[in-house]
Amino acid sequence: MDNTWREVIADWQGETSFIGKNPSGGSVQMGKIGDKPGVSPMELVLASLAGCTGIDIASILSKQKQPFTQLQVRARGKRATDYPMVFTEFEVTYLIWGDGIDPTAVERAIQLSEEKYCSVGLMLSKAAPIHSSYRILKPGESPEVEQLSNLSL
């Protein structure tokens, strides 16, 4: 099998629900099954963006020996009002907890992820602009409520 191809299988669970599976055994529920809510396919796009860039940021900051203790990546997308209701814009916010984190190192990590490493972000940026921001927080500090509600998926 050509190593450049990736594959998942989506098994129908009835009505509008599917279970997506990868060859290594990972799975994700799309749509509601019984009382258990699932993730929508468009939310999976956002989760893929957040996960992809988050992996990069964690790796780069670790290699830079930045003392972060927690990292959260929030991604949201603005959808068109007409079908097919594609995303027309993305926002990614990085919340990084730790003492003594260098903002320049964070900015460089984000730049490297956006311009070189995050294949999901690089692909999506061809379809719609991606805007990013970050906040460095002290351990135990929580973001303001307005920002939580503003950035929630």
Image (spheres, rainbow, N blue to C red):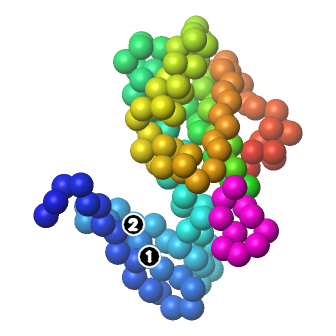
Q: Which one is in front, 84 or 17?
A: 84
Give neighbour class at mark 2: few <14, some 14-19, many 20+ (Cα, 10 Å): some
> Does the rendering let one see residue 98?
yes
Query: In the rendered structure, which amino acid carries the disc numbered 1?
Result: Ile
**The C terminus lies in quadrant:** bottom right
> Residue 50 lies in magenta, yes or no?
no
Q: Residue 116: image x %, image y %?
A: 42, 32
Residue underneath mark 1 = 19
Q: Residue 95: image x %, image y %?
A: 64, 30
Confirm or deny contact between disc 2 and disc 1 (CB under 8 A). yes
The extreme bottom residue here reads 15
For label 1, the SS is strand
The answer to whether 25 appears left or right of 27 in the picture is left
Query: In the rendered structure, which amino acid carries the disc numbered 2?
Result: Ser
The answer for how far apart the CA atoms under marks 2 and 1 are is 7 Å
Does 101 appear above or below 12? Answer: above
Quick one: label 2 or label 1, which is nearer the N terminus? 1
Does 39 appear above or below 95? Answer: below
Does 42 appear above or below 110? Answer: below
Q: Which one is in front, 67 or 50?
A: 50
Displayed quadrant of residue 74 = top right
The residue shown at (45%, 67%) is 28
The residue shown at (58%, 53%) is 127
The residue shown at (65%, 64%) is 86
Residue underneath mark 2 = 27
Give neighbour class at mark 1: few <14, some 14-19, many 20+ (Cα, 10 Å): some
The answer to whether 93 appears left or right of 13 in the picture is right
Q: Residue 57: image x %, image y %?
A: 48, 29
**The N terminus lies in quadrant:** bottom left
The answer to whether 9 appears left or right of 66 in the picture is left
Q: Which residues are magenta?
A: 79-88
For label 2, the SS is strand
